Image: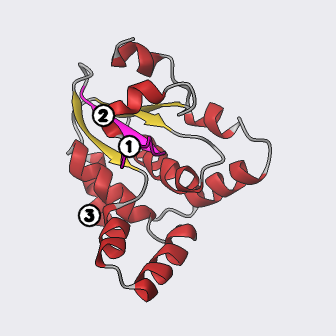
Amino acid sequence: MDIRKLYENGMSFEEFISSDDKSYKEKTLEIYNNIKIDGEMLQRIKSIDKKINILAFAEIWCPDCVLNVPALKKICDLNTNVNMKILPREGNEEYLEDYKVNGKAKIPTFIFMDKEFNVLGSFIEIPDVIKEIVAKGNQVDIIVAKRKYRKGEFTNETIKDILKKIC
């Protein structure tokens, strides 16, 4: 199956969160509702003047998906040129072959494409700032950063990473 057909088979954000009946849905919506975007970032999002299609591989039970899929949804809600569809990782691992980390398909994986479905880039699992903190190896910094990340305090970093790939 080509990536366009894969995208067309994806579900909306609303269908995605409705696949859970309580706690993950509530947390995902809480993260979404608490995203605050500053003036410069808001302008960057609103200035996207080309069609962008994003295929997200995600599962509602995944903590990283609960944190990062709402960031993607916020961008889509602020600019109708940016659209996303979501597919589960389970059953779609073969399509994640090019995006594996250490041989494993990670979620969420966002694949950014232009209007012709040419791949522009990807976002895998966590924002770059967290990857950089982990790479430095300072355990105290890692613990503090991951605690803040799990509370949703790095959602704007996810948005920045996405904007780097699509703008």
Q: Give the distance between the C-alpha atoms of the residues marked 2 and 3, in whole angstroms.
A: 33 Å
Residue 10 rendering spot, x and y as whole percentages = 51, 23
Question: For the point 34% across and 66% down, which residue is it?
Answer: 131
Residue 54 in view = no
**Image quarter of residue 105:** top left
Name which residue type carries label 3. Glu
* Residue at mark 2: 98
**Range of residues picked out in magenta:** 101-114
Rendered position, 58 above or below 8: below
Tell me the mark number nearer the camera, choosing from 1 and 2: 1
* Residue at mark 1: 103
Rendered position, 1 above or below 113: above
The residue at the far front in this view is 103
- Callout 3 environment at 10 Å: few (<14), some (14 to 19), or many (20+)? few
> What quarter of the picture does the C terminus occupy?
top left
Residue 17 in view = yes
Question: For the point 56% across and 26% down, which residue is it?
Answer: 11
Nearest the camera: 113 or 98? 98
**Image quarter of residue 7:** top left
Say what secondary structure mark 1 lies in: loop
N-terminal of the two: label 2 or label 3? 3
Name which residue type carries label 2. Asp
* Residue at mark 3: 40
Q: Give the distance between the C-alpha atoms of the residues marked 1 and 3, in whole angstroms.
A: 37 Å
**Image quarter of residue 90:** top right
Tell me the mark number nearer the camera, choosing from 2 and 3: 2
Say what secondary structure mark 2 lies in: helix
Say left or right for 37 vs 150.
left
